[in-house]
Image (cartoon, helix red, strand yellow):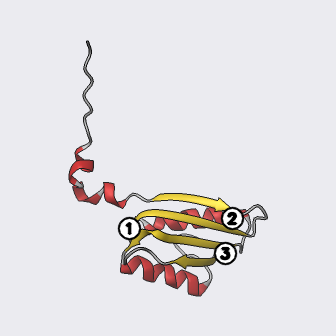
Amino acid sequence: MTTTQLVRNPAHQTGFAGAASRKLKVLVRLDTTMQSARIQVGGTVTIQNLKALYAIARRTNALVPGMEIVVDLSKAHAGAEALADLQTAVERGCLPEKSDPLHSECRLQVLEPLTA
């Protein structure tokens, strides 16, 4: 009889440096007419991982520049600084320069998270 033991990564058990808790779960849905997209986010959005979320928004926007993109944080948590940064992108109508040096029009809408 053979026994297999599962050895877990200590970072997942202890939350070492918060590594496991900072991962985002993201699902992108495009409507059939390519007029809008929804980026469903799970996990905790921080100023550190917001760069990855912007990269997804930039790639989504590249399919049809200027389409409406809803960043749905309704099943996520988000830090105040990350929310403020997202709100700035919404108001400007483009992603931050570090994420999109071309300043392509990006019609973002953000649905509020579970908690800030």
Between marks 1 and 3 in the image, the one whose residue lies nearer the viewer: 1
Is residue 101 visible in the rendered image? The answer is no
Q: Nearer the viewer, residue 114 or 11?
A: 114
Q: Is the N terminus in the top left, top right, bottom left or bottom right quadrant?
A: top left
Where is residue 111 drawn, in percent x and y? 53, 77
Q: What residue is shown at x 57% (from left), y 65% (from top)?
A: 39
Determine contact: label 1, label 3, CB under 8 Å: no
Asked which secondary structure carries label 2, the reply is helix
Total numbered labels? 3
Residue beneath label 2, please? 62
Q: Is the C terminus in the top left, top right, bottom left or bottom right quadrant?
A: bottom left
Amino acid on which the number 3 mark rests in the picture: Ser
In the rendered image, which quarter is residue 20 located in?
bottom left
Where is residue 34 drawn, in percent x and y? 75, 65
Residue 112 located left or right of residue 20: right
Q: What residue is shown at x 50% (from left), y 65% (from top)?
A: 53
Residue beneath label 1, please? 48
Amino acid on which the number 2 mark rests in the picture: Ala
Determine contact: label 3, label 2, CB under 8 Å: yes
Q: How crowded is the residue under tag 2: few (<14 C-alpha within 10 Å), some, or many (20+)?
A: some
Amino acid on which the number 1 mark rests in the picture: Gln
Q: Residue furthest top?
A: 1
Residue beneath label 3, please? 104
Residue 63 located left or right of residue 87: right
Determine contact: label 1, label 2, CB under 8 Å: no
Q: How crowded is the residue under tag 3: few (<14 C-alpha within 10 Å), some, or many (20+)?
A: some
Choose the circle earlier in sequence order: 3 or 2: 2
The Cα–Cα distance between marks 3 and 2, rounded to whole angstroms, is 9 Å
Asked which secondary structure carries label 1, the reply is loop
Residue 29's place in the image compared with 99, above or below, is: above
Q: How crowded is the residue under tag 1: few (<14 C-alpha within 10 Å), some, or many (20+)?
A: few
